[in-house]
Image: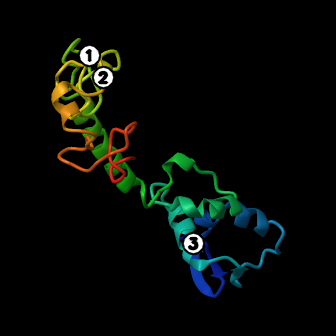
């Protein structure tokens, strides 16, 4: 049977094998400076909560070691690959990024194309940048114009162009003060 080493990490007692002990360079190198009597617990003034993770990681490097405690691996001189450490938010971030990709692909790569040249356009635009000023800027209106509005929408006065909003807008603005972004 392997020799057992006793540790006291800020009051929490551990018993580990000499093999596991030697996988922690800080401890193994420190033992060289001690006398050979290792029957007494070795005291380490570090967080026992984090040491639980350190010990689990030393025993099994597939243990989901929290990335925010990587400084503790540095303290114990344990080699690690930072890209393999666990981030508690990584799954949530991956899910959010996947949702954003889906939404982006639906908006951009859906059936949105300029009605003049069939070039792909972003979101709910009806014209590409080359043709945007050739049509009325009122949403979903495809009437050609040399001005911002076709004759029909110019007659309606200076109304906000946000969906069905009928608020007044300033002469040089496209939207009312509620919908200016």
Pointer 3 local density, CA inside 10 Å: few below 14, some 14–19, many at least 20: some
Q: Is residue 71 placed above or below 125 in the rendered structure?
A: below
Q: Nearer the viewer, residue 45 or 180?
A: 180
Q: Is residue 21 left or right of residue 139?
A: right
Binning the other alpha carbons within 10 Å of mark 2 as few (below 14), some (14 to 19) or many (20 upward) gives: few
Q: Which mark is residue 119?
A: 1
Which residue is the site of mark 2? 147
Vertical placement of residue 54 versus 43, above or below: above
Picture coordinates of residue 13, whole percent (x, y): 59, 84
* Callout 3–callout 1 Cβ contact below 8 Å: no
Which residue reaches farthest bottom?
11
Q: Residue at x 54, y 71 (%)?
A: 1
Residue 179 image point, x, y percent: 33, 49
User: Which residue is at 47% across, 57% downward?
Assistant: 86
Q: Earlier in the sequence, mark 2 or mark 3?
A: 3
Residue denoted by label 3: 50
Residue 20 appears in the figure: yes
């Amino acid at each position: 049977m392997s020799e057992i080493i006793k540790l006291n990490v800020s009051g929490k007692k551990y018993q580990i094998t000499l093999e596991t002990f030697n996988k922690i360079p800080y401890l193994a190198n420190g033992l060289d400076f001690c006398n050979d009597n290792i029957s007494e617990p070795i005291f380490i003034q570090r967080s026992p909560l984090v040491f639980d993770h350190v010990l689990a990681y030393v025993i099994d490097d597939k243990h989901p070691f929290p990335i925010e405690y990587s400084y503790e691996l540095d303290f114990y001189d344990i080699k690690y690959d930072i890209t393999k450490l666990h981030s508690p938010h990584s799954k949530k971030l991956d899910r959010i990024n996947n949702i954003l990709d889906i939404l982006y692909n639906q908006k951009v790569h859906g059936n949105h194309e300029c009605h003049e040249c069939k070039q792909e356009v972003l979101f709910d635009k009806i014209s590409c940048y080359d043709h945007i000023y050739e049509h009325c800027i009122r949403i979903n209106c495809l009437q050609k114009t040399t001005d911002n509005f076709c004759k029909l929408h110019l007659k309606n006065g200076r109304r906000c162009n946000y969906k069905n909003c009928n608020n007044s807008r300033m002469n040089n603005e496209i939207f009312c003060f509620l919908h200016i972004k």
